[in-house]
Amino acid sequence: MSNSVKYIFVTGGVTSSLGKGIIAASLAKLLQARGYTVTIQKLDPYINIDPGTLNPYEHGECYVTDDGAETDLDLGHYERFLNVPTSQANNITTGRIYQSVIEKERRGDFLGKTVQVVPHITDEIKQRIQLLSQNNKYDIVITEIGGTVGDIESLPYIEAVRQMMWEYENACLVVHLTLIPYLAAAGELKTKPTQHSVKALLELGVQPDILCCRTEHELDLNLRRKIAKFCNVSMNAVIEARDASSIYDVPLLMQSEELDSVVLDKLGLSKNSPPELKKWKTFLDRLKNPKAEVNIALIGKYVELRDSYKSISEAFIHAGVSNECKVNVHWIHSDDLDIDNVKKELSQMDGVLVAPGFGSRGVSGKIDAVQFARENLIPFLGICLGMQCAVIEFARNVLNLEDANTTEIADKTKTPVIAIMEAQKNISDKGGTMRLGAYSCELKPNSNIGRAFHSDLISERHRHRYEFNNTYLNQFEEAGMVATGTNPKTGLVEVVEIPSHPWFVGVQFHPEYKSTVAEPHPLFVAFIKASLNNKKK
Ligand code: GLN
C-alpha cells in the first residue's frame, strides 16, 4: 500500500437515512473535479454476505457492478456521480468479513491463536479498506460506514477507523454526518443530538474532523460556534447540509460550504485547481428548466418503497435532461392492475416501463400492462422480468399459445417461452448464483436499440436465472417480435422488439445500472424521446 493514499471515513449519527451515500458521493465528486482520483466504498454492518438475498423492502434496490457483485444501492450513487465503475471491493458486509476470517481460521492461518474481534475482525476490515488503495490507483479512498454510531454491529468498523487514524497519521480524516432537528414548538434548531452523537464517537476513541449537519433551516453563526465548541472541531469544519430539491444539487451545496477545501487542507493536499464542474452545472441547469414533460408509468410490485427502483428513477432523470424534458414517473402497483382497470391507469401515459422482479406476485398485472402498451402503440420498455412478461404476453395474445409462461412461476407449463438457463439448472444456493454482471450483446443495427447506441456491440449488466427459450424464436420472429440483441457467445436472446410498433423494446439486462450524469443511458434516452414523440401525436 502506498503511503500517499488518503483515507476519508464517513460515519453517521443520530438517525439513519441522513444521506451518507449522497454526502460521500458529493465530496468525491468535488475532489474528482479538482483532479484527484477517488473511489468510494461502503461497509455494511449486517450479516448477509451481500444484499443479493435481501427483499427490496429491506434496503431498496440491489445494485449490480460490472464484475457481478450484488451491492448496496449507494454504489449506484457513487457511479452516477463519479462516472467510474465500482466493483466487488467497493461493498463489504460484516458477513463477508466473518466468512473470510472463519475460512482463514479453518485453513490454520492464525497458527493456534484465539481468533477475536480485535485484532482479527478489525484487521480484516482494515485490509478491505486498504485493498482499494493498492497499485496507487486512487489518491483518495472514501469509506462510508453503514448504520448509525452507537449501533452494536458497527463497533468493529469504528474500532478499525480508530486504529487506522493512528497507523496513518495525517492520512485519515473522519466526516461525521449528523442531524440538527428543528423543534417547531420552540421555533429552534437543536444541537444536543449532535453533541451526543459526537460523544458516542469519542467514547470509541474517534474524534470527527468535520461535521456535516443535516438541517431544514439555515445554521447561523451562533449555532455553528456552539457545535464547534461542544464537538471539538474548527468553525469551518461545521458544514451545513440543507435539504436539497435534487440529490444532484448536493455537490454544489457542499462546495459553497467549502467542504472540499476544508478536507484538502486537513489532509495536506494541494488546492491548486478549483473544481471543474461546468458539465455538472449544465446538467443541473437543464434539470431545473425543462422545456417539456412526459408521463411515464413505472409498473412494479415494490412501488411502495421507491428505493426499490432507485437506478431506474435516476436513469429517467438523466434521460429527461438529455431530452430537455421533465419525466413524471407514475408509480403503479402491478398487484393493482388488471384487464379491467389497465385502460384507466395507462391511457394518459406517454410511455410504459415494466420493471424487473422475481416470483409470481404482480406478473399478471405486468402482462396486462404490456398488452395495453403493445395494442395501443405506447412506447414500451421492459427490463428483465419486464422483458420476459412482454415475451409471455406476445406468445399468449399474438401466437395464441394460451399456456405460455415462464418456468419461474409455472414449472409444468407446456409452453415455456421463458425457461431456466442451462447453467442455472443445477444450482440450489440462492446467494450470488444468478447470471450476474457484464456480458456483451450484439445488436442489429436496424432496430430501436441499434439506433440508440450507434454501435453493434455493447456490454450491459445482468441479474437473472431465466431466459428467452430459443426453441420458439422462429415462431416469434415470423409473427413480428424479433430478437435485436443476442449474446455473441451463447446466442441467448437479450433484446426483443416489435418493428411494427413505434417503440417496443424488452431487454434481459439492466440498462439502469449504467446510467450516469455524465453519460445518460442511450436506451433510456431513446425511450424518453419516443415517449415525447408519442405525446406530440
Ligand atoms: N426473475 C427473473 C429471472 O430470474 C427476472 C429477474 C429480474 O427481473 N432481475 O430471470
Image (tube, helix red, strand yellow):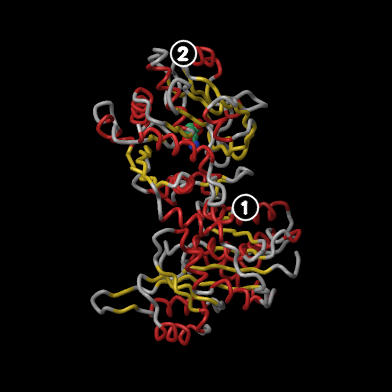
Is the residue marked 2 within 8 Å of ligand 1, measured from its CB? no
Q: Quadrant of residue 294?
A: top left
Q: In the structure shown, which secondary structural element does the residue marked by tag 1 occupy?
A: loop
Q: Decide which of tag 1 and tag 2 comes sooner along the chain.
A: 1
Instruction: Answer left or right for 263 relative to 226.
Output: right
Instruction: Answer left or right for 383 relative to 70.
Output: left
- Seen at 53% across and 76% down, the residue is 210
**Residue 125 image position (x, y, % from top left):** 63, 62
In the depicted view, which residue is nearer to us: 385 or 31?
31
- Above or below, comparing residue 77 to residue 418 in the picture: below
Discs 1, 2 touching: Cβ within 8 Å: no
- What is the number of the mark on residue 246? none
- Above or below, comparing residue 425 to residue 31 in the picture: above
Q: Amino acid at mark 1?
A: Val
Instruction: Answer left or right for 100 relative to 45.
Output: right
- Seen at 36% across and 35% down, the residue is 536
**Residue 230 image position (x, y, % from top left):** 45, 86
**What is the quadrant of the N terminus in the image?**
bottom right
Q: Residues within 10 Å of mark 2 (few under 14, many from 20)?
A: few
Q: Amino acid at mark 2?
A: Ala
For label 2, the residue is 479
- Above or below, comparing residue 282 to residue 427 in the picture: below
In the depicted view, which residue is nearer to us: 67 or 422?
67
Q: Residues within 10 Å of mark 1 (few under 14, many from 20)?
A: few
- Seen at 51% across and 37% down, the residue is 523
Q: State the separation of the CA atoms marked 1 and 2.
A: 42 Å
Q: In the structure shown, which secondary structural element does the residue marked by tag 2 occupy?
A: helix
**Residue 58 image position (x, y, % from top left):** 42, 50
- What is the number of the mark on residue 84? 1
